[in-house]
Image (tube, helix red, strand yellow):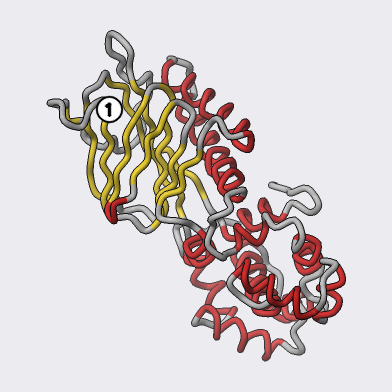
Amino acid sequence: MVTTLPGDHLAEVLRHVEIHGVISGGFTATAPWVSRGDVTDDVKIVAVLRGHAHLHTDGGASAHLVAGDVAVLSRRSRLALHGGSRHATARDIPPPVGWASGPLPDTAGPADTVVGGHIRLGPTGRELLYPGLPAVSHIHGTDPAAHRLRAVLGLLLEECSGREAGSGFAVAQYAQLLVLESLRASAGRTDLPPGWLRLLADERLRPAVRLMHDDPGRPWRLEQLARAAAMSRTGFAESFRRTSGSTPFAYLRRWRIILAEHALRHSDTSVDALAARLGFASPGSFSTAFRRTTGVTPSAYRRAAAVSPGSSR
């Protein structure tokens, strides 16, 4: 059973919307080289474990990545990575698909080691994460906020370069940490679009968010939430909307439905009990709100989750 520390709302959100990191493969090559292809994932991750790589995507976005850097791509359809000069005749490296056991192939001389992966999102995770991510988020390994990220990349490099038994399992665990540390580092950016990641990183609004997360069924009033943030009602409402992209009560209503979705997927809690726990006046009002958000009733949602290959109790 996975638990979260009190007040750890980023971990709580990641757990309830079931955001998963996947490392799909990697390569080691001596420059000049190029690797390009289509991006079919919701959110793409590229990490440079050693050496350098020039990243270019559709829309003109680009980044120069050095060892310890990570790029998080959102809503992109094409990706090109170059090692060395873009004008030199380069060896073409197909994007790696799947994770091969054993070490990445190495070459003589200074080499670049790159791993790629993605963040797997369900509909709720896509709804929450997409609006709050820039097209390309370049996380510098030298940033103070990325010190744990550098440690994760170091562990990945060890697994990629060694012949230890169980490396595939280890890489899968490090992929989750890579997602977490990438989101943590991204949350500190000042240019994040409005969204839940920016909201959860806002220290002034955090006490009000904590109240809503810790007791989602309570009929919160605006003045109570504003008081927790040491702000006026008007100032709090405007700051919350500007940071999250929604009003405080729209956020609370969506969070209640997220909790309900998770409970319906992973527990046998009755619809009546969920309605009472989450602050709805009646099972009927809960069912109406749930259907308005998800398009199906709570009972239909539970039945669909029970037969889905990705569901688990």
Would residue 38 be found to the left or right of residue 289 on screen? left
Q: Amino acid at mark 1?
A: Gly
Where residue 66 sits: x, y (%)?
A: 42, 28
Residue 220, image quadrant: bottom right
Residue 229 or residue 257, whichever sits in front = 229
Residue at 22% over, 32% down? 34
Is residue 54 in view? yes
Residue 142 or residue 81, whichever sits in front = 142
Quadrant showing the C terminus: bottom right
Give the answer, above or below, for where 143 lies relative to 164.
below
Q: Residues within 10 Å of mark 1 (few under 14, many from 20)?
A: many
Is residue 219 in view? no
Q: Which residue is mark 1?
A: 83
Would residue 13 be found to the left or right of residue 152 on screen? right
Where residue 139 sits: x, y (%)?
A: 50, 40
Residue at 55% over, 80% down? 293
Give the answer, above or below, for where 187 lies relative to 89.
below
Q: Dot 1: what SS?
A: strand
Residue 85 or residue 183, whichever sits in front = 85
